[in-house]
């Protein structure tokens, strides 16, 4: 029985949050939701806010092909919605216009059978 995509997505977000935490990031919030979009993980390190979009797939980690990139599912329309949601977050939290921020994308490959994961980070995606 294959896990449902929402379960895979939630697991991927937990794994990415732990990954970032282990690299000195402070997780500020997860699953910030507005009618027009969602931010999976919001983290901070060195004064920069990182808005992380997580894309997860279930596959055999050993069978992960370099040509398959879950992060490619972050298409221009998704980035546009994400940017609008980020702007809402910044205004709602009264974050200064001077505060640096960036969008990062995490591709997560989950092998449910072996309970292993591989993460591929793309930092500072330009909209």
Image (cartoon, rainbow, N blue to C red):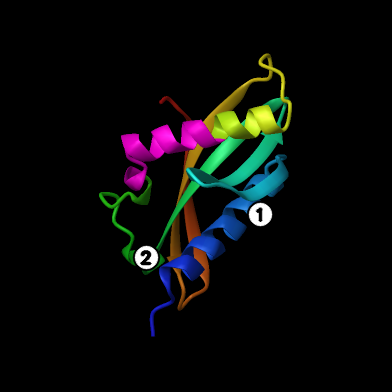
Q: Is residue 121 left or right of residue 49?
A: left
- Give the residue drawn at x 41%, y 26%: 127
Q: Nearer the viewer, residue 46 or 101?
A: 101
State which region is magenta: 72-85
Q: Nearer the viewer, residue 90 or 63?
A: 90
- Which image quarter is the N terminus in? bottom left
Q: Secondary structure at mark 2?
A: helix
Q: How far from the left and from the top, in percent, is residue 8?
A: 47, 67
**Residue sticking out furthest to the top:** 98
Residue linked to disc 2: 62
Q: Is residue 81 left or right of residue 26?
A: left
Check residue 66 for magenta coloring: no
Examine the rendered structure and indicate whether residue 94 appears above or below residue 19.
Answer: above
Tell me the quarter of the picture where residue 59 sits. bottom left
Q: How far from the left and from the top, in percent, is residue 95?
A: 72, 25
Q: Nearer the viewer, residue 31 or 117?
A: 31
Residue linked to disc 1: 18
**Residue sticking out furthest to the front:** 35
Q: Is residue 64 left or right of residue 53?
A: left
Mark 2–mark 1 Cα distance, whole angstroms, equals: 22 Å
Q: How far from the left and from the top, in percent, is residue 78?
A: 38, 40
- Give the residue drawn at x 57%, y 37%: 51
In this figure, what is the number of numbered marks? Answer: 2
């Amino acid at each position: 029985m294959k896990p449902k995509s929402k379960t895979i997505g939630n697991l991927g977000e937990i794994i990415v949050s732990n990954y970032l935490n282990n690299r000195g990031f402070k997780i500020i919030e997860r699953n910030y939701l507005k009618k027009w979009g969602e931010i999976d993980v919001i983290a901070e390190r060195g004064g920069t806010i990182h808005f992380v979009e997580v894309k997860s797939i279930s596959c055999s980690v050993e069978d992960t092909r370099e040509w398959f990139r879950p992060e490619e599912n972050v298409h221009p329309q998704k980035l546009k919605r994400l940017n609008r949601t980020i702007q809402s977050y910044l205004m709602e939290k009264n974050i200064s216009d001077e505060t640096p921020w960036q969008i990062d994308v995490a591709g997560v490959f989950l092998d449910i059978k072996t309970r292993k994961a591989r993460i591929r980070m793309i930092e500072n995606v330009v909209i």
